[in-house]
Amino acid sequence: MEQEMFNQRTDLSQLNTAVQQIKETLGKIIVGQKDTIDLLVAGLLADGHLLLEGVPGVAKTLSAKLVAKCISATFSRIQFTPDLMPSDVLGTAVFSPKTAEFQFRQGPIFGNIILVDEINRAPAKTQSALFEAMEERQITVDGHTYLLEEPFMVLATQNPIEQEGTYRLPEAQLDRFLFKIEVKYPSLEEEIEILTNQHQHKTDEQLKEIKAVLSVEQVKSLRATIKALFVEPKLLAYAAQITHETRNNKSLYLGASPRASLAMINSAKAIAAMAGRDFVTPEDIIKVATPVLAHRVMLSPEKEMEGLTPADIIAQIIKKIEVPR
């Protein structure tokens, strides 16, 4: 019986080939950042939106653009600024003298991969323009609903340090991101490699050579494969317990919603498939717990003053809960 459990039920050869090609493509340009690349690929396979956070110059925007280049799909880039209006994102009705009627002109949100650069620079009314699009994959303008073409993925970047001219993202919007990926500084060796590549003009040449490795239909097929992966009931309970503990932890002012549990399971399936397995393990859930939960919880004022981070509390919660075997 135990042997049957570990027999491969799903053919993951196509998925593993695609993952390897995407990682190789990203790895040609992005030096180091292995965890970031893994989470970017997992987010793509799990059909989730991603928030990349880091100081300027750590290749957040470049990483997002490279993910888009890996897929033969429509790509839009929206630079969020304080004066950006919802119509600049969604589109607007334009009067046509020929027909004497208003015609809807689509905004940049109508694409497969949407890069929202510096997402925290736009005010709340513009942020709200993304709510319906991110959750329901549609937009409503002037009483008309327009469906967004699948696959639809928002890749957003933000700088956590600079506060001048920025707005805090609403909790409802943060909850719509599958992961918040913290893009860290490179190590000394990695930074030397970056300088060497730029000095020898390797990066520019490699950027020109990048070609799409997946079609839109292949992305849809891979996502369907991921959704069909096996998850034991005890692991579903484990993910739910982690989320539940965030709501009963004295160090947290706000806990995570059931959407976080769903995100944890969906992304754990992607991590398992990327490792060549058609079943989820507790380690897969642990690996995605922090990027799934960190932006969905809020520290209590006391813990914030102590210098703790949401990741610290999530690590404490995971350590406290018995891992199912």
Image: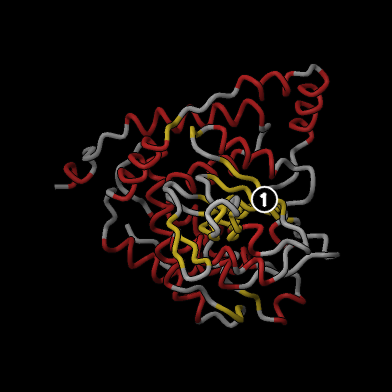
Residue type at mark 1: give it.
Ile
Task: Tell me, yes or no, if residue 275 can be seen here.
Answer: no
Residue at coordinates 45% horizontally, 33% vertically from top-left? 19
Q: Residue at x 42, y 48 (%)?
A: 150
User: If the image is split into quadrants, where does the C terminus sit?
Assistant: bottom left
Q: Nearer the viewer, residue 140 or 4?
A: 140
> Looking at the image, which residue is at 24% across and 39% down?
10
Vertical placement of residue 24 versus 127, above or below: above
- Using residue 292 as the reference point, say whether residue 55 is left or right of it: right
260 left or right of 81 in image? left
**Residue 186 appears in which quarter of the rendering?**
top right
Is residue 186 placed above or below 159 in the rendered structure?
above
Q: Is residue 18 visible?
A: yes
Task: Classify mark 1: residues with Cα within 10 Å, few (<14), some (14-19) or many (20+).
Answer: some
**276 lies above or below 122:** above
Question: In the image, residue 116 lies at what x, y percent?
Answer: 65, 52
Residue 243, placed above or below residue 79: below
> Circle 1 sits in a helix, a strand or a loop, which is it?
strand
Which residue: 50% across, 82% down?
Answer: 248
**Residue that sits furthest to the left in the current view:** 1
Q: Which residue is mark 1?
A: 78
In the rendered image, residue 151, in percent from the top left (x then y), is placed at 43, 46
* Left or right: 28 as drawn, with respect to 270: right
Please state the total of marks drawn on the protein image. Answer: 1
**Quadrant of res 231:** bottom left
Please provide percent x and percent y for residue 211: 55, 24
Residue 283: percent from left, percent from top: 43, 52
Which one is in front, 78 or 177? Answer: 78
Q: Quadrant of residue 92?
A: bottom right
